[in-house]
Image (cartoon, rainbow, N blue to C red):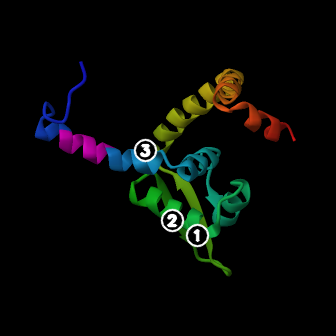
Amino acid sequence: MTATSSETSPALASASCRARSVLDRIGDKWAIYVVDRLGAGPRRFSELHRGIDGITARMLTVTLRGLERDGLLTRTVHAAVPPRVDYALTPLGQTLRTAIGQLVGWADEHLDEVETARSDYDARSCPPPCEESAAS
């Protein structure tokens, strides 16, 4: 039986709201890529930027700051010219990497099934004129 909002205790609702803020961070597509890339070891900003297709420098900066704030990664500034900054997963971040690895593994394992389901859905949902224009 699923609890409705009127059946949920205040403590449970509070915990749910707190968990949502964490899930919002770790469920972000860029955070998943950053954690995955850092799983292989410390990386510089430029390495992460080059290794994550489609992410802007600004979005990478925002993502790194959020992950650092949540205790999932560390930022180490090295005294060098030019300044060098490395990012690495914390032990907490490593536990997230394990979970992300399982999710990626599931996606790899079921990719063909998902693509087939998408094709079936699109074929059912797209009226005949749509199918003709999609073929063009």
Q: Looking at numbered disc 3 in the image, what kind of residue is underneath it? A: Leu
Provide residue 22's location: percent of width, then percent of height.
Answer: 37, 47
Would you place residue 93 above or below residue 49 in this image? above
Q: Which range of residues does the magenta coloring cover?
A: 13-19
Provide residue 84's location: percent of width, then percent of height.
Answer: 63, 72
Provide residue 55's location: percent of width, then percent of height.
Answer: 65, 60
Q: Which residue is pictured at 56% across the width and 29% down the height?
A: 102
Residue 17 belongs to the span the image colors magenta? yes
Q: Which residue is pictured at 55% across the width and 67% down the height?
A: 61
Res 117 quadrant in image: top right
Provide residue 2's location: percent of width, then percent of height.
Answer: 25, 23
Would you place residue 11 above or below residue 72 in this image? above
The crowd level at tag 2 (other Cα within 10 Å; few <14, some 14-19, many 20+) is some
Which of discs 3 and 1 lies nearer the camera? The answer is: 1
Circle 3: element type = helix
> Which residue does the numbered mark 3 point to in the structure image?
92
Residue 85 belongs to the span the image colors magenta? no
Which of discs 3 and 2 lies nearer the camera? The answer is: 2
Q: Is residue 37 left or right of residue 22?
A: right
Kindly identify which numbered label has been placed on residue 119: none
Q: Is residue 54 left or right of residue 23?
A: right
The crowd level at tag 3 (other Cα within 10 Å; few <14, some 14-19, many 20+) is few
Circle 2: element type = helix
Q: Which residue is pictured at 48% across the width and 45% down the height?
A: 27
> Which residue does the numbered mark 2 point to in the structure image?
62
Q: Quadrant of the N terminus?
A: top left
- Check contact, mark 2 vs mark 1: CB within 8 A: yes
> Which residue does the numbered mark 1 point to in the structure image?
58
- Check contact, mark 3 vs mark 1: CB within 8 A: no
- The one of 127 and 53 positioned closer to us in this rendering: 127
Residue furthest to the front in view is 129
